[in-house]
Image: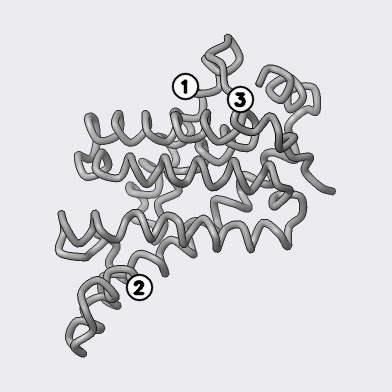
């Protein structure tokens, strides 16, 4: 079974309608709960972009970017100040998911894997400078930071070690989130999918 992408010409259309005003808070809530759960269980992934993925797939990259940005700000103000720093990363993720979905890269399970890798690269490229500036290059996830420590101990440049640390975590996280979003999207009523598509 395949997902049906948004038409490319409508990808960047966005209006603050009743539909998007409902979708964005829902996506923020999904992000918030998923990230809090992952942190509470000390999982090796963040899961905090699940709502962003779904918003981008339903209503396009702008809706996804807004959802991700708002979630990072709210999460940073309530549970983890660190999260606010990565609001720009969430914008990049929302845009990447929306563009890939509109071009058919969430149309099959095989393509979802490729999409997840691309999104992981986007996330890592944006997050690495933030990691270096604010946290000395680390991510705060123990096993990723262990890899960072090993690379630095072996005289690898901090930027390379930081990117590697971030990327290996992003690969696992984005593959998990991409497939979760893919399977959830496939279960949504087609009437709902067409409603958001026509609305945008």
Q: Which residue is mark 3?
A: 13
Question: Tag 1, which secondary structure?
Answer: helix
Which x, y percent locates residue 81?
Answer: 19, 39
Real-space CA distance between mark 3 and mark 2, rounded to the nearest whole angstrom: 35 Å
Which x, y percent locates residue 182?
Answer: 67, 46
Q: Nearer the viewer, residue 20 or 169?
A: 20
Question: Tag 3, which secondary structure?
Answer: loop
Q: Which residue is mark 1?
A: 25
Which x, y percent locates residue 72?
Answer: 33, 36
Q: Is residue 104 left or right of residue 85?
A: right
Residue at 53 percent of width and 47 percent of height: 96
Label 1 Cα neighbours within 10 Å, binned few <14 / some 14-19 / many ≥20: some
**Number of the front mark, 3 or 2:** 3
Q: Earlier in the sequence, mark 1 or mark 2?
A: 1
Q: Which residue is mark 2?
A: 164
**Farthest residue in the right direction?**
1
Label 3 Cα neighbours within 10 Å, binned few <14 / some 14-19 / many ≥20: some
Colouring chosen for the image of the structure: one colour
């Amino acid at each position: 079974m395949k997902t049906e992408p948004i038409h490319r010409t409508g990808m960047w259309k966005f209006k603050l309608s009743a539909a998007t005003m409902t979708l964005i808070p829902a996506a923020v809530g999904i992000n918030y709960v998923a990230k809090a759960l992952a942190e509470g269980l000390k999982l090796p992934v963040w899961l905090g972009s699940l709502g962003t993925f779904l918003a981008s797939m339903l209503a396009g990259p702008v809706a996804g970017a807004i959802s991700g940005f708002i979630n990072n700000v709210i999460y940073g103000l309530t549970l983890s100040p660190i999260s606010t720093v990565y609001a720009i990363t969430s914008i990049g993720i929302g845009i990447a998911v929306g563009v890939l979905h509109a071009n058919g890269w969430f149309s099959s399970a095989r393509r979802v894997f490729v999409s997840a890798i691309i999104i992981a690269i986007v996330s890592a490229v944006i997050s690495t400078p933030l990691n270096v500036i604010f946290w000395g290059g680390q991510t705060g996830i123990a096993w990723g930071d262990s890899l960072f420590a090993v690379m630095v101990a072996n005289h690898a440049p901090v930027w390379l070690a930081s990117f590697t640390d971030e990327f290996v975590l992003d690969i696992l996280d984005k593959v998990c989130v991409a497939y979760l979003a893919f399977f959830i999207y496939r279960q949504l009523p087609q009437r709902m999918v067409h409603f958001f598509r026509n609305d945008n």
